[in-house]
Amino acid sequence: MAVSPARAAAFDILLRVERQDAYASELLHSSRFANLSTQDHGLTTELVMGELRWRSLLDRKIASVSSQKLDKLDTEVLIALRLAAYQLMFLERVPDRAIVNESVELVKRARKRSAAPFVNAVLRKLADKTSAAEAGPAAQPAVAALKRPPTYNLGAGEEQIAEAKTEAELSHTSAHPLWLVERWTKQFGYEVAKQICIYNQQVPEGSIHLHGEDKLAGVKLSPGKVLRSARRVQAGALLNARDPRSDRIHIQDEGSQLVALLAGKGSNILDCCAAPGGKTRILAYRNPDATIVAAELHPHRARLLRRLVPAQNVCVIVADVRALPIKTSFERVLVDVPCSGTGTLARNPEIKWRLRPANLVEFQQRQLSILQSAMQNVAPGGRLVYSTCSLEQEENQAVVEKALAADASFHILECCAELEKLQSEGELTWKDMKSLTSGPYLRTIPGVQPCDGFFAAILEKRF
C-alpha cells in the first residue's frame, strides 16, 4: 500500500521538528512541500499541527495499548503512532483500516520494517478502543467528544478544557505541560489560564496587514478585530513572497502589528532582530520618508528580510545588535527580542514540548544584553520599544526593570497613552483598552484578546 503524499509529508516534517528543533509552520511553507496539491497541503497541515497540539493526549492513548514504553521506541515509530492516533481520535473521513495500514507503511518507508508488526498491533487495539468509546460515550467521554471532522476548530474539545476544575485537569485535557499551566494560573488566574489553553488548541485565524489596499482578488477578507488596517483571511489562498502584491501585504498576527504601531514615527529608525520583517514593513509604510536600519544576526534571515521588505528607505544589515557597526543615534528603536514564544503556541505548538523552566533564565540573559546594547543607540528624547511574544514575566517585566535599574538616563512611558493615541487616530479598534495593558506595559493574552500573546514596553531617553 502506497503512502499518501500528505501523510508522507506530515511524517517528514514531524521528524525534522523532533530531530532538528525546526518549526513546523516554516517547514509547511518551505519550497520542499510547495508541490503538494491544495487538498494535500491542507491535510498535511492538519496532521502536523494536530499531532503537535495534542501530543500528550495522543501519547497517553498509545501508552494504554502499547506493550512497550514510549520512551523506548525509535523516533520514527513514535511519530507514525502519533499520526495514526490523531487520525483515529480526531478525524472521521478516513476508514480506520486505511489509517492503520498507511502508518505501517510509513514505518517501513522509514527503514524500521522490524517495527511494523508492533505498530500494526498497537494501532488495531487503539482503533478498537476508539470505536468502543464512540459506541459507549459514557465509558470514555474524552475520546468520543474529541472525534471530529477536520474543520480546523476545536469543537467539543473546548468544552472539556473549559470544564476542568484543577490545574492538573487543565493540563491533562488541554495537552499542555503542567508547569506552564501552573505559571499562567499564578500570573493571570485560573480562568484566564483556561482561555489561553483553549485558544492554543485551536487553529488561529490568518491575519494580514494591508498597505493601502482594501481588497485582494480571490481572497475573502473580514475586518480586523483589533486594528483598522488589519484583515482576517476567511477564504482563498494566502499570499506568498512570490506574489506580485507581496510588497503591499504581509501575513502577520494583529498583536504583532500592534507592537509595530507602538514604535511610532521618526526620521531615523532602528529595527533590531528584524527578520522576518513584518514589523519592519509596517515601520516603512508609516514612515515613508524616514531612514530605517533593519539589523539581523543571521545572513539567511537577512536575505529573507530583504526579499519581504523591498522598501527603498530600508537598509538591511547583517549584524549583532550587541556590536552594531554603526554609531548613529536613532529617534525610534524597536527591540523585538528572541524569546520563548509562549504567546504563540497556537501557531507554534512544538514550543510547549521543548521548553523547560531553565530556558527562561537563559532567554532573559540574552534579552537583557540585547536591550542594554540597543539603548546605547537611542538619541536624547528618543524612544525604544522592547517587545516579546512571550507570556513569561522573566522575559518581560523583569528584563525591563533590570535595564532601567542599570541606566538612569531612561524612564518608562505608559503604553496606555500611546494606545489611546492610536485609538483617536482610528487605528486601534479594540474597545476594551484596559485589557490591553498591565501597569505601564502592553499585554495581549491569547483567548482574552483574539490574537497571540505579546508584551511591549516603551522607554524614553531623557534629554
Image (spheres, rainbow, N blue to C red):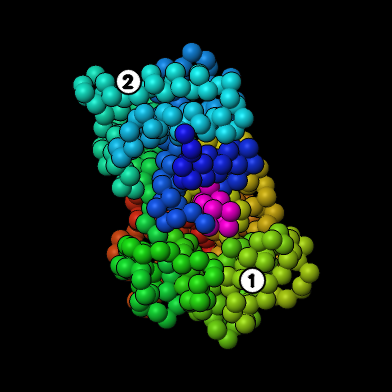
Foreground of the two, 223 or 91: 91
Q: Which mark is residue 327?
A: none
Q: Is residue 190 magenta?
A: no
Res. 183 visible in picture: no
Q: Earlier in the sequence, mark 1 or mark 2?
A: 2
- Decide whether the magenta segment is chiefly helix, strand or loop: helix
- Going by the picture, which residue comes out furthest to the top? 67
Q: Is residue 290 above or below residue 45?
A: below
Residue 10: % across, % down? 50, 43
Q: Is residue 230 above or below residue 192?
A: below
At label 2, counting other C-alpha atoms closer than 10 Å, the crowd grade (few under 14, some 14-19, many 20 or more) is some
Q: Quarter of the image holding residue 451?
A: bottom left
Q: Quarter of the image holding residue 433?
A: bottom left
Task: Tell me the CA gap for discs 1 and 2.
Answer: 52 Å
The three-letter code of the residue at mark 2 reads Lys
Mark nearest the camera among 1 and 2 is 2
Residue 210: % across, % down? 42, 74
Q: Which residues are magenta?
A: 24-34
Label 2 sits on residue: 129
Q: Is residue 151 above or below residue 194?
A: below
Q: Which mark is residue 306?
A: 1
